[in-house]
Image (cartoon, rainbow, N blue to C red):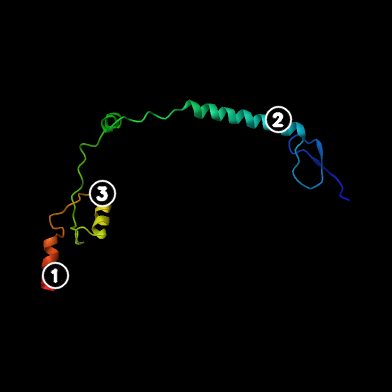
Amino acid sequence: MTRAILIPCQYCGAPQTRRKQAAATCYRCRKQREKRHAAFAAEVQRETAAVEPPPRPANVFEAIERQGHDEDFEPAPKLVPMRSPPGTALRVDELAAAVRAGVDLWHAEDATFEDLTQTQENA
């Protein structure tokens, strides 16, 4: 036979009967909390519904007109030439790193197909 335990309500202190030792909430406090939560959820829903995302631009020109452009961008000069063969994954990775760094993509001394054929003939 299990004995009921009297536990005070964690909000108002009114005694609550529970069979297990746990944080008890009386019926009145539980209903008040549910009402507060429902009111808060409704307020959040109203606030989020009022905020509409900006309309999507119809074309690229409209997007440029809204957000501006970087027409005056000049990349920094590239100091070190690429030695990886053109068309390889390594070359693509080097080009991607140059774009992320804002550096010019090409250098006058980058490796070319002619350089590759000359090194293969000399070997």
Counting from the top left corner in percent of width and height, residue 41 is at 59, 31
Between marks 2 and 1, how big is the CA–CA gap? 83 Å
Classed neighbour count for the residue bearing mark 2: other residues with Cα under 10 Å, few (<14), some (14–19), many (≥20): few
Label 2 or label 1, whichever comes before in sequence order? 2
Is residue 112 positioned above or below 69 on the image?
below
Residue with the mark numbered 1: 120
Q: Give the amino acid at mark 3.
A: Val
Classed neighbour count for the residue bearing mark 3: other residues with Cα under 10 Å, few (<14), some (14–19), many (≥20): few
Residue with the mark numbered 2: 32
Label 3 or label 1, whichever comes before in sequence order? 3
Between marks 3 and 1, how big is the CA–CA gap? 30 Å
Q: Residue 99 carries which label?
A: 3
Classed neighbour count for the residue bearing mark 1: other residues with Cα under 10 Å, few (<14), some (14–19), many (≥20): few
Q: Report whether 95 appears left or right of 1.
A: left
Q: Report whether 101 appears left or right of 29.
A: left
In front of the other: 63 or 79 = 63
In front of the other: 120 or 25 = 120
